[in-house]
Image (cartoon, coloured by chain):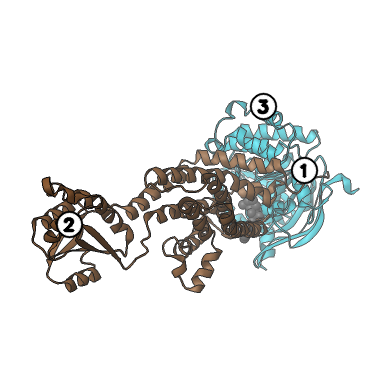
Amino acid sequence: MADDFAIDVKGMTKSFGERKVVNHIDLQVRAGEIYGFLGPNGSGKTTFIRMLCGLLRSDEGSGTCLGYDVIKQSDSIKREVGYMTQRFSFYEDLSIAENLDFVARMYGMKNRKEAVQKSLEHLGLAERQKQLAGELSGGWKQRMALAACLIHKPKLLLLDEPTAGVDPKARREFWEQIHQLAAEGLTFLITTHYMDEAEQCHRLAYISYGNLLAHGTVDEVIKLAGLTTWSVRGPDLLPLVAQLRNKPGVQQAIAFGNMLHVSGDDPAALEQAIAPFRREPYQWQQIPSGLEDVFIHLMENSKDNYSS
Amino acid sequence: MKGWPNFSFERFWGIVVKEFIQMRRDRLTFAMMVGVPLLQLLLFGFAINVNPKHLPTEVLLGDNGPQGRTLLYALKNTSYFDFVRLLKTEAEGQDALARGEAQFVISIPENFSRDLLRGDRPSILIEADATDPVATGYALGSLNTLVNTALQSDLKGPLAYLNGTSGPFDLRVHALYNPEVNTQYNIVPGLLGVILTMTMIMITGLAITRERERGTMENLLSMPTRPLEVLVGKITPYILVGYVQLGLILIMAHFLFQVPVHGSVLLLLTSALVFIAANLAMGIMFSTLAKNQLQAMQMAFFVFLPSILLSGYLFPFRGMPVWAQAIGEVLPLTHFLRIARGILLKGNGLQDVVPELWPIALFAAVTLTIGVKRYRQTLD
Ligand SMILES: Nc1ncnc2c1ncn2[C@@H]1O[C@H](COP(=O)(O)OP(=O)(O)OP(=O)(O)O)[C@@H](O)[C@H]1O
Ligand SMILES: [Mg+2]
């Protein structure tokens, strides 16, 4: 049933000049779901989101967003979508309350004053409401932006890197809020570069150079990548990285804190490759691949595809 | 959800309120909006209408009698005239005026004293270089009282009867090169239009480009706003600013430069509404066409020049070639100058104003339409 999808688009494409920035992306997001949208810098995440809410005209593609035609009915979509831009784009010379009031007016809210007051309290902004938005710290700016996106009670929230530059505690609170709102029925499409946030999403999509490389639940995405990963602990791992990277069967060797993740998609070849190094002082252990291993793997592969 | 009207007053008003708050917080722009007209009026007004004194004057003295001397002293005492040379022939005087060496040549005829004492009311000829009428206006004005008072101390006792009612002698003024003698009255009402044109176009010229440059456009566009709501919402607050400027200029014009107000002020204020709106619409159109604030500024200057040169502000409209007049007729300033001068100086009424008003209204409608059409609802 199409109604179950908050977003259901096919073949979304956008070029800037000669460059295809978003390349035939299909995406389905179920209502009430938190959907993570991941990919390296410049992979086309922001561009894709802008197309969804009618801020950019797509070159190709069709589908629906909240049941409205994504190409023709962007006016209707805008009314029911909250879009939090990657870059803070509220008025810095207006106070928090004035910004919220402005937004409420733009959506033609009936009991505007009340709605503004409620949202100020709800997001803990009441005491700072007179402060100019431009004077807020990054975290408070995000909080205000989220409040502004929620004020008109949207059904779908498109959040473009909402937690970039936000401290861990604020990030945690932010996500708690998102889970709460999702439980109330809101749908989220969130871009992020944080793995811990990606893991909190019900489902996610990974794009690179405008191509959708993987999508599904975290487990599905990991499983689909078919990656085997070993971790190594020990002193002086840096020379080891250089040696391992040249071995056939080793596709990546990445430092994770004080250990190394060594991965490859052929388990036998990988085991053979690491065999000479499985000695003191190194401690080897096979571990389940994590999202980050998989994403780095996807990114490396897509680079090859792209250049060839 | 149905029934969303095309134009939402709520959203329009939201934009108006926002613009007002931003205007209030932006001290520099605010200062510009009030300060620039004041400064311009003072600078232009005084620079153009300066009451120039000590103007170089040359004298052709045909008579050496005491009354002639007294008269020259009296002229000198007005401090408008500085005697720089004594001329020998009339031709010398013509030459000096032509070369701009002298602003005035005063000729005291032969037998001046004799004729004066006889009661023949001899004539004194004052030739003025009136190329710039403003420069000579005050000096010539001072002469009128001089006729009666200059010789009062000389003509006492039995000679007192010579003072008479029309003065003991006659002054003939020849304004050379510019016999029409435009006065400064012409310039201050003109300045009214010029100042409004400049500030109004500049302010709104930045309106949309500023949103783009600050990145707030992305947010504005992601909300269900419509072009007309945004553009009209951004214009409206500045109509008020225009009126503040207008009021300041009118008050200064009247009390500082003694510009007369012969017609209805209400009529002037009403016509100004159309004129202000036209300039704001033009600015907002530039704003939608320009990629950034700098481009918007450049477009604004592209209009200032013809507005100042071809509107009849600096040069008489009728003296311009046909093609220049054709361009001038398109500009709102041209028509507003006629309205403002007509109302202030000639006491024109509604029927005289309307023929000049509709071209301005048409201009406003066309530019706003282009603005709405060009207002991009997407970021690409
Ligand atoms: N208006 C534009 N004109 C031309 N190129 C653009 C425009 N907007 C984006 N791009 C290009 O499109 C590509 C994708 O940009 P986009 O902002 O969608 O990436 P992103 O995935 O959001 O990256 P990030 O994680 O850094 O935010 C980039 O290479 C960018 O340079
Ligand atoms: Mg982005």
Work out whether disc 3 and disc 2 sit on a shared chain. no
Whole-percent x and y of residue A34? 76, 41
Which disc is residue A121 wearing?
3
Q: Is mark 2 within 8 Å of ligand 1?
A: no
Which disc is residue B263 wearing?
none
**Chain letter for mark 2:** B
User: Which residue lies at the image location 50% right of the left edge and 62% below the top edge?
Assistant: B303
Whole-percent x and y of residue B55? 21, 58
Q: Residues within 10 Å of mark 2 (few under 14, many from 20)?
A: some
Ligand 1's quadrant is: bottom right
Query: Which color has been applied to chain B in this rendered view?
Result: brown
Work out how far the residue at label 1 is from the one at label 2, CA to CA, in angstroms.
Answer: 97 Å
User: Which residue lies at the image location 69% right of the left edge and 38% below the top edge?
Assistant: A105
Whole-percent x and y of residue B296? 52, 58
| Residue indicated by mark 1 | A80
Work out how far the residue at label 3 is from the one at label 2, CA to CA, in angstroms.
Answer: 97 Å
Give the left or right position of residue A199, taking residue B22 as reference.
right
Q: Secondary structure at mark 2?
A: loop
